[in-house]
């Protein structure tokens, strides 16, 4: 018993409590839900990228046996409350917001824009019904790229905006930009492009909306990163009071930023459920996921870099254009985070930044794992380009520019202190893990044989959750709340607004609580996914390790104190003498005195204690992030490029990273590897493609290619010992880092492999055909 | 992504299947392995009125070899052909191509006849059939006829099979002594359709090439024989220079399609690289089979 | 509607699906076995993989009527009595999965592969699983799980951890 109690769960790769159900097919995802009387929805979607809707004839669809109802965009307007997207309203942006209807009414704005919803006895019949809906469209010229969108002659997608600019052009400066550029030895000009690609979780969006007419109550079974944010979205759109809506979620098949709030389709399904007084299920298929759910990353950058002859990156002046697609989404918030993060861990003295967000006839730009990732791509790409021009080694130029770790810490020119940042250490660790001189010798020998190997590295930091802000919580989204309760069966229940969709919170939070409270791991239950029961929260922004790990740690201590206080009355002992070990409360040094915590809870619930004794063994806890902190590291890839076919294979991939203390190393490593895989995918395989008419050409998995087990190598990960910033909470997030830094790591390696040809790369997507084009167009004299 | 409504027939014999085809003609689709047809239906790109499921026509399965010909029943699963010793020995080019078809789960259902009747120009089996001058045996209302590979592939997903005809078997010539084969392809990922693929067969006799077959996948709307390159190779001894020239001839007048995965120019370049690689590999394996 | 009879996880089942209904939908909707997942419905992602008459098959590319008379094994039937088989246990021990959506197809594909290749190498395993897409893990933990199962099947160690059943004290995380 004592041995078990002494073993700490935190820091160990405790096996996941999620897995028994996951491994046996007993997970419960939204498409697994069946409710009595449930109907199925499918959407009629526009084949046109930009058109006026002249007429919608649903009569044949309505007449199809098995079709229960069809709602056009206009009919849905009558049964919903018009307004902006709830998430955008929550974020609260300046400037006019585009006015649009829930489903398209007068015009469609991207190929896939939903025009009508068909509700039937089965999804098969609903799709049959969709084929019978006749829509007459009047073509409009499509706006298929940002530069046309910014041209005043482009037809505005939204009548009330008058142009295709999603957010007003803005410029800001940090430091003395003019002087820095005037005094620099060299000024470089680069144009860097990042292509459109997307989240692609294995489970798409979907929900089962179930309206109970007797109680005027809406229950939505959702796949979401926050049940509370989804609830707000549903209540707003349906014009219902918040306490008349409940959102629940079970298992969720990934999201990576896609499933936040409630999509137009989910809201339409909820409205239909209320109108029909029956549950309505809508689950998107892969075609809808690829064409209509949302896309990300399509950004271009004109970059001026002020550099010294010795390779100091003194200043940057950046113009960013982001293609935010059609309907409003998180895209408009990305530029400001890009700006804030552009200096990275480097000693940048000046930053000029301007951005424009363009509206185009494509699916909406949504959050995708590290939405601001382009800042790392731009910075780490240009460092290599500058190094090549100046004849410097990529590792050396980074070591030269990394801010030293000082006390007080260096501050990014955009304002945030680089407290506890170990970028220098991660670069040095990579140099220890990868014998770069030996690689260079092998590279030279290989080139003589006509084989092209390359090595690339990139460094990043991410605010996970970010350093302490004066007078405020660390990181966005505010403080983290949790309710903790000791149940009568001895279970320590944690009620959290986190909504795991692969993050293993059911395991990691239980590890922390078990350690802090004093029960076995199996005696902690993490409760998620029910707005009736859990506090507000959202899983995203790499926040949960710190914010939720922290509130769990402090909350478990608070609950333990309360339980010991009650136990002191129960056991007539001093609180000082009591301890909880292995699920039993007892007097230290007197094992015979110990009582199971469940028994303690049962006694508390018995009501036998008077009003002077607090027998309510439940606490509410909040955590503001403590000292917060950064995560970050350096990635390094060795690749081989077949210059006859353009195919790239990754021979080795090494990570030296720092996320503070690890709650569960296997979970951390899994997050990093998954992110790196998506980064490799972005460079070698994944592109959301639209043709000049606005048709989406990557509408199936045969054209939108994601990496497989043959595309992702073993990824070696080393965790650095971090400088602890907080007395207790030194876990930091890793959810997004892999995906942020893997793309520049890969592109840097590919450019290095192709350097004998004089190739210089200013873009992120390098399919085989593009690699051959780059070789053909390059000048070996460079 | 649900299939549209279809009527369904499940004949037990070729005769029954042919009668159904004769009745429904272009309104019917034959369902064999389903690995190509069912996605088309799920994407609602095809709306046949009737599915004629020939999985119950057991007389259509089997691999047999007689007198220099290997006959493969149209319903023979790709994995069966892959595991067949007869195919490995007698049709090594087919054996080389089979493991490249999709993934194991696809080959567990997909059929030799189904792939060849579907006639995707980027698929492996049409290039193999074209390289080896395979013969396609069809049976229709009027009886049986044999169609040579050169006449079987008419266009994109189009064969010369008449609407009332069922492909019943495919005949491959057995490889002679001194024949080496290679199937090479460039695909974005393991198991994907080839961006460009090449079926190569070389027969060496006395150190010189006595027979050369080169058939491309993915450079046109049908598999394409590189006859100019083949003519160049016959009578010559294998060498890198010869193979380079063969690559030039094989790709000088192909006009490949352009799509998301590659431009026409890219496909041409890759096709040339595959010719060099395929000839080298086929010549090496021909040496082993002397 | 076509009447069919088949065996699923060792039990005789019947149904009357429309001809157009896929085996995947028949399992999920008609037999209420939702362990088999739909990730793409066009035969690329592998999430729907089941075993039919001993061979791995994409159940979204098979009509239910085509499974008449067949023996079908799904994820629910891999290890009877609520326990875990060797592969499942090895994957649990290896932290193979995150969101779990690809898991049933991945486990069924690996099961079918290992039954024919019990001593598979890492490269062979990667190729065998290359038709199953996972978006969360980067595959290494999945491959490690399969490799561990290979090792344990080769020399079963009586002292190795093996749960007879999923931990009974962990309540399922379900809606109230």
Image: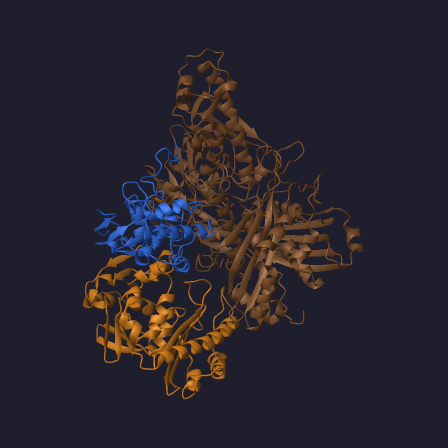
Chain colours: A brown, B orange, C blue
Residue B45 seen:
yes
* Residue at 57 percent of width and 45 percent of height: A330
Question: Which quadrant would the C terminus of chain A be assigned to in this image?
Answer: bottom right
- Count of marks overlaid on the render: 0
Which residue is more in the foreground, A204 or B191?
B191
* Percent x, y of residue A499: 47, 38
Question: Which quadrant would the N terminus of chain A be assigned to in this image?
Answer: top left
Instruction: Establish if B224 lies above or below A468.
Output: below
* Percent x, y of residue A767: 53, 63
Instruction: Establish if A679 lies above or below B101.
Output: above
Residue A104 seen:
no
* Residue at 46 percent of width and 21 percent of height: A589
Instruction: Establish if A591 lies above or below B76.
Output: above
* Image quadrant assignment for residue A154: bottom right
Furthest toward the front, the residue is A589
* Percent x, y of residue B213: 38, 80
């Amino acid at each position: 018993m004592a041995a078990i109690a002494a073993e700490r769960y935190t820091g160990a790769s405790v096996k996941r409590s999620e897995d028994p159900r996951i491994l046996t097919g007993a997970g419960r995802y939204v498409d697994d839900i069946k409710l009595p009387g449930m109907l199925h929805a499918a959407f009629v979607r526009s084949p046109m990228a930009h058109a006026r809707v002249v007429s919608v004839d649903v009569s044949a669809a309505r007449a199809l046996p098995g079709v229960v109802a069809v709602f056009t965009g206009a009919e849905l307007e009558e049964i919903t409350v018009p307004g902006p997207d709830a998430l955008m309203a929550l974020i609260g942006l300046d400037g006019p917001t585009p006015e649009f209807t829930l489903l398209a009414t007068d015009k469609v704005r991207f190929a896939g824009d939903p025009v009508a919803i068909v509700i039937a006895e089965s999804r098969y019949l609903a799709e049959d019904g969709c084929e019978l809906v006749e829509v007459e469209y009047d073509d409009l010229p499509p706006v298929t790229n940002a530069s046309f969108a910014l041209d005043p002659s482009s037809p505005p997608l939204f009548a009330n905006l008058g142009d295709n600019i999603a957010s007003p052009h803005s410029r800001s400066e940090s430091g003395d930009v003019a002087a820095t550029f005037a005094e620099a030895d060299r000024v470089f000009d680069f144009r860097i492009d990042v292509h459109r690609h997307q989240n692609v979780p294995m489970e798409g969006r979907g929900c089962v909306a179930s309206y109970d007419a007797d109680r005027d109550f809406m229950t939505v079974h959702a796949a979401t990163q926050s049940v509370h944010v989804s609830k707000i979205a549903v209540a707003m759109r349906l014009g219902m009071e918040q306490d008349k809506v409940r959102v629940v979620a079970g298992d969720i098949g990934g999201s990576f930023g896609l499933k936040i709030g409630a999509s137009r389709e989910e809201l339409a399904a909820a409205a239909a459920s209320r109108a029909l007084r029956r549950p309505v299920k809508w689950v998107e298929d892969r075609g809808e996921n690829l064409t209509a759910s949302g896309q990300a990353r399509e950004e271009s950058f004109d970059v001026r870099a002020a550099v010294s002859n010795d390779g100091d990156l003194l200043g940057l002046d950046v113009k960013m254009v982001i293609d935010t697609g059609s309907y409003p989404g998180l895209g408009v918030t990305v530029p400001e985070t890009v700006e804030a993060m552009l200096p990275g861990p480097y000693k940048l003295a000046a930053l000029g930044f301007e951005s424009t967000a363009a509206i185009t006839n494509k699916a909406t730009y949504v959050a995708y794992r590290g939405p601001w990732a382009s800042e790392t791509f731009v910075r780490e790409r240009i460092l290599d380009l500058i190094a090549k021009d100046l004849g410097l080694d990529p590792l050396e130029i980074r070591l030269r520019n990394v801010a030293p770790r000082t006390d007080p810490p260096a501050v990014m020119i955009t304002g945030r202190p680089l407290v506890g940042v170990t970028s220098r250490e991660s670069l040095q660790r990579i140099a220890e893990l990868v014998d770069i001189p030996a690689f260079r010798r092998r590279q030279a020998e290989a080139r003589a044989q006509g084989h092209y190997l390359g090595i690339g590295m990139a460094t990043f930091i991410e605010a996970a959750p970010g350093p302490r802000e004066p007078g405020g919580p660390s990181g966005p989204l505010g403080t983290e709340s949790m309710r903790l309760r000791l149940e009568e069966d001895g279970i320590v229940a944690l009620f959290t607004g986190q909504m795991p969709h692969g993050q293993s919170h059911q395991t990691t939070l239980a590890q922390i609580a078990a350690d802090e409270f004093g029960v076995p791991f199996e005696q902690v239950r993490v409760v998620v996914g029910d707005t009736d029961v859990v506090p507000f929260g959202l899983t995203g922004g790499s926040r949960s390790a710190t914010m939720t790990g922290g509130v769990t740690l402090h909350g478990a201590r608070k609950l333990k104190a309360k339980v010991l206080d009650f136990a002191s009355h129960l056991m007539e002992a001093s609180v000082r003498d009591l301890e909880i070990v292995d699920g039993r409360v007892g007097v230290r040094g007197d094992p015979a005195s110990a009582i199971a915590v469940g028994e303690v809870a049962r006694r508390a619930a018995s009501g036998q204690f008077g009003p002077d004794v607090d027998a309510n063994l439940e606490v509410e806890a909040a955590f503001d992030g403590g000292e917060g902190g950064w995560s970050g590291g350096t990635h390094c890839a060795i690749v081989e490029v077949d210059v006859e076919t353009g195919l790239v294979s990754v021979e080795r991939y090494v990570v030296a990273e720092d996320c503070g203390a690890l709650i569960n190393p296997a979970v951390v490593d899994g997050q990093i590897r998954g992110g790196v895989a998506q980064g490799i995918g972005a460079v070698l395989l994944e592109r959301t493609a639209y043709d000049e008419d606005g048709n989406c050409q990557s509408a199936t998995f045969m054209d939108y290619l994601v990496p497989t087990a043959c595309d992702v190598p073993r990824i070696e990960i080393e965790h650095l010992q971090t400088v602890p910033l907080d007395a207790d909470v030194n876990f930091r997030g890793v959810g997004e880092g892999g995906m942020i830094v893997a793309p520049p790591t890969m592109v840097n390696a590919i450019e290095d492999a192709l350097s004998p040809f004089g190739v210089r790369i200013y873009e992120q997507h390098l399919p085989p055909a593009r690699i051959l084009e780059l070789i053909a167009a390059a000048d070996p004299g460079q | 992504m649900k299939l549209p409504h279809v009527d369904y027939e499940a004949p037990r014999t070729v005769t029954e299947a042919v009668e159904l085809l004769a009745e429904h003609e272009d309104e019917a689709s034959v369902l064999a392995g389903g690995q190509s047809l069912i996605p088309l239906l799920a994407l609602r790109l095809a709306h046949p009125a009737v599915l004629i499921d020939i999985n119950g026509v057991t007389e259509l399965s089997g691999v047999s070899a007689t007198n220099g010909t290997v006959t493969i029943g149209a319903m023979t699963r790709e994995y069966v052909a892959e595991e067949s010793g007869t195919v490995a020995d007698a049709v090594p080019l087919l054996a080389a191509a089979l493991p490249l078809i999709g993934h194991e789960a696809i080959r567990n259902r997909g059929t030799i006849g189904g792939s060849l009747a579907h006639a995707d120009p980027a698929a492996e089996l049409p290039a193999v059939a074209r390289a080896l001058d395979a013969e396609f045996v069809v049976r229709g209302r009027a009886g049986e006829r044999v169609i040579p590979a050169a006449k079987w592939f008419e266009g994109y997903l189009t064969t010369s099979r008449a609407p009332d005809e069922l492909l019943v078997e495919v005949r491959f010539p057995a490889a002679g002594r001194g024949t080496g084969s290679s199937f090479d392809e460039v695909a974005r990922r393991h198991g994907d359709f080839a961006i460009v693929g090449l079926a190569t067969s070389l027969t060496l006799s006395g150190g010189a090439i006595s027979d050369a077959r080169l058939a491309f996948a993915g450079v046109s709307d049908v598999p394409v024989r590189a006859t100019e390159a083949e003519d160049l190779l016959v009578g010559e001894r294998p060498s890198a220079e010869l193979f380079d020239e063969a690559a030039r001839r094989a790709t000088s007048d192909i006009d490949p399609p352009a799509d998301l995965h590659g431009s026409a120019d890219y496909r041409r370049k890759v096709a040339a690289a595959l010719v060099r690689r395929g000839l080298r590999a086929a010549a090496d394996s021909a040496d082993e089979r002397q | 509607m076509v009447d069919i009879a088949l065996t699923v996880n060792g039990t005789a089942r019947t149904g009357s699906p429309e001809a157009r209904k896929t085996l995947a939908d028949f399992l999920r909707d008609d037999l209420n076995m939702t362990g088999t997942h739909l990730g793409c419905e066009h035969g690329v992602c592998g999430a729907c993989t089941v075993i039919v008459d001993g061979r791995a098959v994409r159940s979204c590319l098979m009509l239910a009527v085509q499974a008449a008379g067949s023996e079908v094994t799904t994820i629910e039937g891999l290890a009877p009595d609520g326990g875990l088989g060797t592969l499942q246990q090895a994957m649990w021990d290896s932290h193979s999965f995150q969101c779990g959506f690809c898991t049933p197809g991945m486990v069924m594909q690996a099961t079918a592969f290992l039954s024919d290749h019990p001593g598979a190498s890492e490269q062979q395993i990667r190729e065998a699983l290359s038709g199953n897409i996972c978006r969360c893990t980067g595959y290494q933990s999945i491959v490690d799980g399969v490799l561990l199962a290979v090792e344990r099947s080769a020399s079963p160690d009586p002292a190795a951890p093996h749960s007879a059943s999923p931990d009974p004290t962990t309540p399922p995380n379900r809606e109230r």
